[in-house]
Image (cartoon, coloured by chain):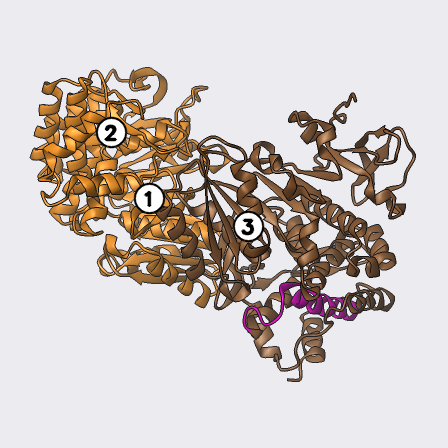
Chain colours: A orange, B brown
Amino acid sequence: MAFAPAASTSRPFAINTSIGSSFSEPRVCIAKLTASTFQGCRLVFEKEAMDPRSFTRTDLHLRVSASSAVLEGMPFTACGDMAVVNVDLGDRSYPIYIGSALLDKPELLQRHIKGQKVLVVTNTRVAPLYLDKVIEGIKGKGGDLIVESVILPDGEKYKDMETLMKIFDKAIETRMDRKCTFVALGGGVIGDMCGFAAASFLRGVNFIQVPTTVMAQVDSSVGGKTGVNHPLGKNLIGAFYQPQCVLVDTDTLNTLPDRELASGIAEVIKYGLIRDAPFFEWQEKNMESLLARDAGALAYAIKRSCENKAEVVSLDEKEGGLRATLNFGHTFGHAIETGLGYGEWLHGEAVAAGTAMAADMCVRLGWIDRTLQSRILNLLERSKLPTAPPRHLTTEMFKSIMSLDKKVADGKLKMILLKGPLGNCVFTADFDPKALEATLAAFCEK
Amino acid sequence: MAFAPAASTSRPFAINTSIGSSFSEPRVCIAKLTASTFQGCRLVFEKEAMDPRSFTRTDLHLRVSASSAVLEGMPFTACGDMAVVNVDLGDRSYPIYIGSALLDKPELLQRHIKGQKVLVVTNTRVAPLYLDKVIEGIKGKGGDLIVESVILPDGEKYKDMETLMKIFDKAIETRMDRKCTFVALGGGVIGDMCGFAAASFLRGVNFIQVPTTVMAQVDSSVGGKTGVNHPLGKNLIGAFYQPQCVLVDTDTLNTLPDRELASGIAEVIKYGLIRDAPFFEWQEKNMESLLARDAGALAYAIKRSCENKAEVVSLDEKEGGLRATLNFGHTFGHAIETGLGYGEWLHGEAVAAGTAMAADMCVRLGWIDRTLQSRILNLLERSKLPTAPPRHLTTEMFKSIMSLDKKVADGKLKMILLKGPLGNCVFTADFDPKALEATLAAFCEK
């Protein structure tokens, strides 16, 4: 089957996507990035007229492959049910592979392994499920490849400097060198810690993300934010460090607890709210399918989330402004996580409550209407996510922790707030502080 | 006095230097980077014919200022006895200011301070000498500038993750934000730790180096290598992170112990050996002046060292190859430091012994002649530096530690070795391992 790479575009968007169908007859359609419909990106189908906003679930099983993969010489037939989203960062660009059973296609990982030594970083929960498969897959590359692993304790409360040192200890014991590759196999905590370790070991080694939770697959594995927590604040110590690739095997979600699944959906909802109204509307129609782990719905939500994230990161890697909008709901959310003690609530649960608080504040500011607030609360509730922080957190606790937020500059807290119709937000310190006070008063007992 | 910036050059060199005389009559001469004589760089004096390789001590008091400073709008008259070497790294370029009493010119620091909060990182030895002056100097910028400080214990043995955390703790306690600036006031250990903290705090904040030892002024403060030691190896954890500027006040050397002074000179000798034969010859003529802390000799040695380092770093920031040559003598040296326990020997002392060992190995390989080896040993001895490791370090210890060197790739150790006439070296894994064995046997009792 002849397959031409999609035409390139001069626009600064990340998503060059080529789509082949999985219908019974072999049909090929090629998508090109052309103009802006949903937040700057529309897929135009050359051979079939399809509106990406009216995808049925059958449509979602379309085989998707990125032109980047084609250009890199990977045959389309090898892509199977795989989407590829490219994160466009010049010579640090990298692909996100998304699809079912990708861990059974070890050549995807193998092509991004550099050097002759690999250190897989995972945790006690994920190791029994996927570690052997990943190690065997990498070893299949052949040669003198040596694959080591380190298994960390599971959970946000271990996302600290002490646990990070275990990665360095193992790397040094096993003689990892500058050309080696670190592979993060797990959720957001593993990805953030392994990434920071890769950024810092010998001042930087290669790094691959294999996220196994929704949270990591739709958000934390993409974009190069890495780090650990400080007892006084989330992610205060870290680095911007991009991986060689992100490999999302959606089948890993089959072993994910319901609570973790819902946690990740908080970030999916976020993308809709801040920049992708059609995606939010799609979620309103399909939330139950997502929670029921419908493979097509999950694959679509992951791909669309990655596309949104990739675009934002490509435009603002180091968070000069735009990228900060991805932290909608996180200022309150991080305060909840820090205030409760790391690991009490999952990150997405805290973000969900933070989203509800931010929506409340936006209504008080008169920046969104109550209808939108209701839609947000409704979607969070359908996702089985909390819509308020634990009552025992005080306004003083919130204020104290929020004053340490990374988005404080020159003494002023900048927040991401919704403003206007669905899909619009601002990143600003220019808001009436009384609205923040009122929101905290409304959500805290004292 | 009219003063034109030096003509720009399309060559990839870092050093654009404009020179004004300090002779009694105001004369101006402008130096342009034109062609290669000593390792790719020659200063051509337009108004006065002077050979930079035959500088007398009087000549050395020339007022030197970089075109970069002029272009940034700093009046030449403000430069006084100051040299400026520019580290050319595109939008991360920065100046190195070198001169006497620069801490009395706080405007130099002030212009590179960003944000409204500053954290000065220093140690127990340097704090009583210079901390107040630096804090007052920065505060003189006015506005709402808040200047905090953290005083770490002194010495290489505290260059670890635990001490690094004290910087983060202080930064968080004092509400440093993303726009803040960290200032490293001290020697190489402070610079490396403060730099890594700046690279990692909130994923990166501004950073200024104020080195107060020869070692830091001629080497470690320039080029953005930052990090901490691991118990098993030197600088195994860190980042490449460039400062906003480096401010070298040569007067700070007046309070430096003799042993520290000699330690720094080991790196000065290194530049001559690996790439700047005329500089080595200058040292052979002027070593006693350096050890006697002759201000002119020190200023010249610092400036010429920084020029060498700036050029190498500009060409190879992330140590793809060329930059590794700056580690001549360090593979053995780091093994000595690690083997003895950090802080037993000063870094430069270990590098000096490492230099002697490397020279021995090069003779065994037939890559340099015995005359050059003798000159090297002679210069090290005149500098009161060791020319052999402590006898109780064993060959096994060396081999074990060297196998963890950052320059090991795919199981092979690459070394920097002198080859050919003075001023030439290679970075290679392609050497007869028997020569390494023989050198270790010659320097170790067992």
Question: Which is closer to the viewer, label 3 or label 2?
Answer: 3
Label 1 chain ID: A
Q: Is residue A26 above or below residue B262?
A: above
The residue sitting at 49% across, 68% down in the picture is B232
Residue B239 is at least partly visible in this image: no
The residue sitting at 15% across, 30% down in the picture is A439
Residue type pointed to by label 1:
Leu
Residue A93 is at least partly visible in this image: yes
**Closest to the observer: B387 or A179?**
B387
Q: Is residue B165 left or right of residue A231?
A: right
Labels 2 and 1 within one chain:
yes
The x, y position of residue A107, in whole percent, is: 38, 48
Q: Is residue A228 left or right of residue B91?
A: left
Q: Main secondary structure of the magenta part?
A: helix
Please say if the residues under marks 3 and 2 sit with CB atoms less than 8 Å apart: no
**Residue that label 3 marks:** B131
Give, as a single range, the part of the protein colored magenta. B341-365
